[in-house]
Image (cartoon, helix red, strand yellow):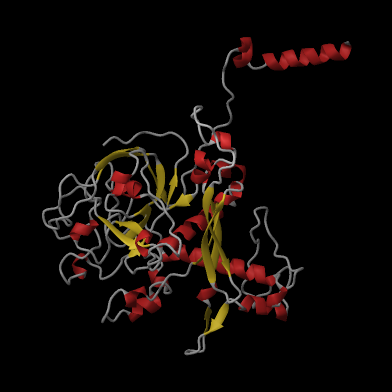
Amino acid sequence: MFTTAIIALLLTSCAGSDASMAGGELTGANSRSFSEPAPFGMVLIQRGSLKLGEEETDSLWGSSAPFREISVESFWMDDTEITNAEYKQFINWVRDSIIRERLADPAYGGDETYKIEEDKNGEPIKPYLNWKKAIPWRKPTEDQKVALESIFKINPITGKKELDVEQLNYRYEIYDYAQAALRKNQLDPTKRVRNTDTKVNADEVIMISKDTAYIDEEGNIIRETINRPLTGPYDFLNTYIINIFPDTTCWINDFTNANNEMYMQLYFNHPNYNDYPVVGVSWEQANAFCAWRTDFLLRGLGPQAKYVQRYRLPTEAEWEFAARGKDGSLFPWLEDGTHSDESCYYANFKPEKGNYTKDGSLITTKVGSYNANSNGLFDMAGNVAEWTSTVYTEAGVLQMSDINPELFYNAAPEDPYYMKKKTVRGGSWKDPERFIQSVSRGYEYQNESRSYIGFRCVRSYVGTNKTSKR
């Protein structure tokens, strides 16, 4: 009886220790709030609405963007386009990961017992790539040097050692929460239909599409879209393998009968171009970068990682909403025209026919060279056009919802080529004034890479903030 009385006393004491629980009133189960820190190099675009597109057809070009009023949720956006230096960090990470795996792979002369000293997040504590310098905890053997060197090749023309870019393949997985949540895709047949007058067919076969990829014995990336009966939640986990090195030959292939060999050789490799926007990156490679950037971030966040949304390409609606600024203008700047009375240009584009240099640049220029728009974003007009996540259709947002509109489809290799069009926004250094307006739309195929297309990332914002009224 004594023990029972003590327990009863403790329970009464605990229940009464929180005044909000007194009297059995409903107060809610509160947990500690999470204040999402501002991501480095990003600005917060506050939720709001916008009349997307143009109400009138352009009198000169005879074209118009689909017009519709939409609303979007808050999101973080890179204040500049992704630069060569930032993309090189991705390249180096993939290179280093390949070497780490081969250090423990006997097939590459590695040693299964060879371990790299790591921190709590699984990251190497000390540099290990430059084997010519002594590695403090273990010096690599001659066999291990073979593993370290396997990612390089000898150029048959110059005889110099260089990175074998064909090996720079990044594998990542994306879980399709949206498809998994659809009622038609539920494992339990009784959850597929809410209409109680409809008899549920427990034997109905639900077909799903799953993207998968692997590397064959010849080293080729084989990507497939599998259509098969629904078996479980893993059916919505899509796997991709992408070669991530930019196509430096785009400078040659985009312009016939032009002397652009220097750009092909130096634009991505020379340090003088580090702060220039990366180009020659396909839509598929840009998505791989977003997946890597997400993984790179989550490794260092710990338990709070579950609250952070993944990096991705902006939707077409998000891009225009951010580009038009707080006043919804057709250009990122508020003034009429593209330059001041003193002929100071507001963006890097093609001012006149055949004259690329009137604005001070011939090709791209360093990111952030021109003033930001009212949202704090640089180069939302000109410099390089930018990939969005949205499938390109003539109807545009007219086919989408008016809340967070989006059409996403990662076309499989076997799909017709017209299904691989992705919307490109912003115009570039080679485009005239009409195409650098915030409402102008273009497209490119998802596996294509151009010397005038780059990208920037966004991340959905978790929390509440002010609404932007336009």
Look at the image and tell me whether residue 28 can be seen.
Answer: yes
Q: Which residue is at 47% across, 39% downward?
A: 462
Name the residue: 15% across, 67% down: 352
Quadrant of residue 387 in the image?
Answer: bottom left
Residue 342: x and y in percent read 14, 59
Judge from the rendering whether residue 94 lies leftward or rightward of residue 322; answer left or right: right
Q: Nearer the viewer, residue 314 or 59?
A: 59
Where residue 339 appears, x then y in whole percent? 17, 57
Residue at 36% of width from left, 73% of height from top? 250
Image quadrant in which you'd find residue 104: bottom right
Residue situated in front as seen by the camera: 195 or 457 = 195
Q: Looking at the image, is 357 positioned above or below residue 193?
A: below
Could you tell me which residue is drawn at 42 percent across and 72 percent down? 271
> Relative to residue 143, is residue 326 depicted above or below?
above
Position of the C terminus, as image quadrant, is top left
| Residue nearest the observer in this picture, 382 or 416 | 416
Number of numbered labels in the structure image? 0
Point out residue 300 in the picture as x, y percentages from the top left corner.
59, 51
